[in-house]
């Protein structure tokens, strides 16, 4: 073993080349097997999220199989309710598309007249193509939404596979732990159990916290948009909350869509500004109050590592990768921190103990304490 370590210390370039090559091969394998690995990985995360409830039911003398079924039914009930809510809103929005098209045409005419007065150049020819494309987009939006709803057949099949995975992950969880201990040296069993415990705790706290923040943001967005008078405020509010699962860019995308709709369909430009203000204010609350207190920075990775893993996850698994690779990175950091040769990598992707997560709120609390 010492000879192997000396060999890698003697030829560090070879070691880093092999490590880089393994990274590319691993990424390629993740991309090639994404149809298998995405539902498998999502089921593993959801199984760890449901583990506390399942254990609680088992303590109440509920058989493990029945306890797992009850947990899955609870998740399905929540998803069904959310799906019905969004489907109703989408159908209602599709019915309003013809009226939105007329309002958009009038708004484009106003912009056209403004351009003509400003530049003294006929803007009709310049805007004609854009107006034609927007009209075609709105006319096809209803058909596109119908195709999206028709595509739910594949989604339901994937959901069925995920449910099966979740059931067996929870049912055979003790066997998985024993297997990991069997392939680990006896003197490392204590550390291995600690790693598994920290991974389970991180997953539960991160995913549970993120879902809580999503619900709060969906309510705040919907209330704010309803007060402003935006059509389908609940749809855009819930969509904005769901997109917040994607760090950094999710809230921007969720706020951009209703802002553009308000800009193109409402008579006053102030409405679009108000919509942007609602999402900006909710983003401030999320960054400085909700996420620091509910999620609490459990992943403990720095923003640079987060952005890089988002890009990699988006390239490899799309939106699913952008969502799931964040807890995966947190799990990797836990392993790095407990394995001596890998601790430098844990330090590289980690953050300082007194990092600036929720810095605004933390500074306010410190100043109040000083006074």
Image (cartoon, rainbow, N blue to C red):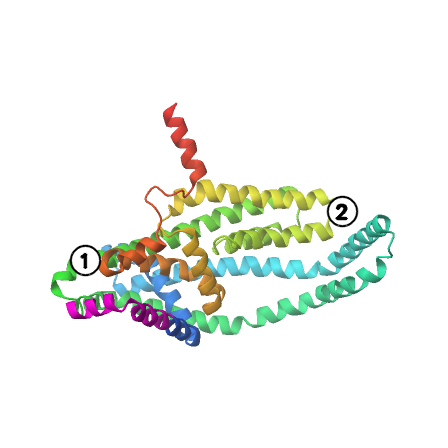
**Residue 293: % across, % down:** 39, 42
Q: Which mark is residue 222?
A: none
Quarter of the rendering occupied by the C terminus: top left
**Residue 350: % across, % down:** 35, 52
Label 1 packing within 10 angstroms: few (<14), some (14-19), many (20+): few
Dividing the picture into quadrants, the one containing residue 47 is: bottom left
User: Which residue is at a point 73% across and 56% down the rendered structure image?
Assistant: 100
- For marks 1 and 2, the one nearer the N-term is 1
Furthest residue toward left: 187
Q: Is residue 315 left or right of residue 7?
A: right
Dividing the picture into quadrants, the one containing residue 24 is: bottom left
User: Which residue is at a point 75% across and 57% down the rendered structure image?
Assistant: 99
Element at badge 1?
helix
Residue situated in front as seen by the camera: 329 or 348? 348
What residue did someone put label 2 on? 267
Is residue 61 shown to the viewer in this render? no
Residue situated in front as seen by the camera: 186 or 56? 186
**Residue 269: % across, % down:** 72, 45
Is residue 281 shown to the viewer in this render? yes
The question of residue 15 being in magenta is answered with yes
What residue did someone put label 1 on? 191
**Residue 338: % across, % down:** 23, 57
Q: How many marks?
A: 2
> Considering only vertical position in the picture, is 280 above or below 244?
above
The span shown in magenta is: 1-23
Majority secondary structure of magenta residues: helix
Q: In this view, does 254 lie to the left or right of 287?
A: right
Nearest to the eye among marks 1 and 2: give it: 1
Element at badge 2?
loop
Quarter of the rendering occupied by the N terminus: bottom left
């Amino acid at each position: 073993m010492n000879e192997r370590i000396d060999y890698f210390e003697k030829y560090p370039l070879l070691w880093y080349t092999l490590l880089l090559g393994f990274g590319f091969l691993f990424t390629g394998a993740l991309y090639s097997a994404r149809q298998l690995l995405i539902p498998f990985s999502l089921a593993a995360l959801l199984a760890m999220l449901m583990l506390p409830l399942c254990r609680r039911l088992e303590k109440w003398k509920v058989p493990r199989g029945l306890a797992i079924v009850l947990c899955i039914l609870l998740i399905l009930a929540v998803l069904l309710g959310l799906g019905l809510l969004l489907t109703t809103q989408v159908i209602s929005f599709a019915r309003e598309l013809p009226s939105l098209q007329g309002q958009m045409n009038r708004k484009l005419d106003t912009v056209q007249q403004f351009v003509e007065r400003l530049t003294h150049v006929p803007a009709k020819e310049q805007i004609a193509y854009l107006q034609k494309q927007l009209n075609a987009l709105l006319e096809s939006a209803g058909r596109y939404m119908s195709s999206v709803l028709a595509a739910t057949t594949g989604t339901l099949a994937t959901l069925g596979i995920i449910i099966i995975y979740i059931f067996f992950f929870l049912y055979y969880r003790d066997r998985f732990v024993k297997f990991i201990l069997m392939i680990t040296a006896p003197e490392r069993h204590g550390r291995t159990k600690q790693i598994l415990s920290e991974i389970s705790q991180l997953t539960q706290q991160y995913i549970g916290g993120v879902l809580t923040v999503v619900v709060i943001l969906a309510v705040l967005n919907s209330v704010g948009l309803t007060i402003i008078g935006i059509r389908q405020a609940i749809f855009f509010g819930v969509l904005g909350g769901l997109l917040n699962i994607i760090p950094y860019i999710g809230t921007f995308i969720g706020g951009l869509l209703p802002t553009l709709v308000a800009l193109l369909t409402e008579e006053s430009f102030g409405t679009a500004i108000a919509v942007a203000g609602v999402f900006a204010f909710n983003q401030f609350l999320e960054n400085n109050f909700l996420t620091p207190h509910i999620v609490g920075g459990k992943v403990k990775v720095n923003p640079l590592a987060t952005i890089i893993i988002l890009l990699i996850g988006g390239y490899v698994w799309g939106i699913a990768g952008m969502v799931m690779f964040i807890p995966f990175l947190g799990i990797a950091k836990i392993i790095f921190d407990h394995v001596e040769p890998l601790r430098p990598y844990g330090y590289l992707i980690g953050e300082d103990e007194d990092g600036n997560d929720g810095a605004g709120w933390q500074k306010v609390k410190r100043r109040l304490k000083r006074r």
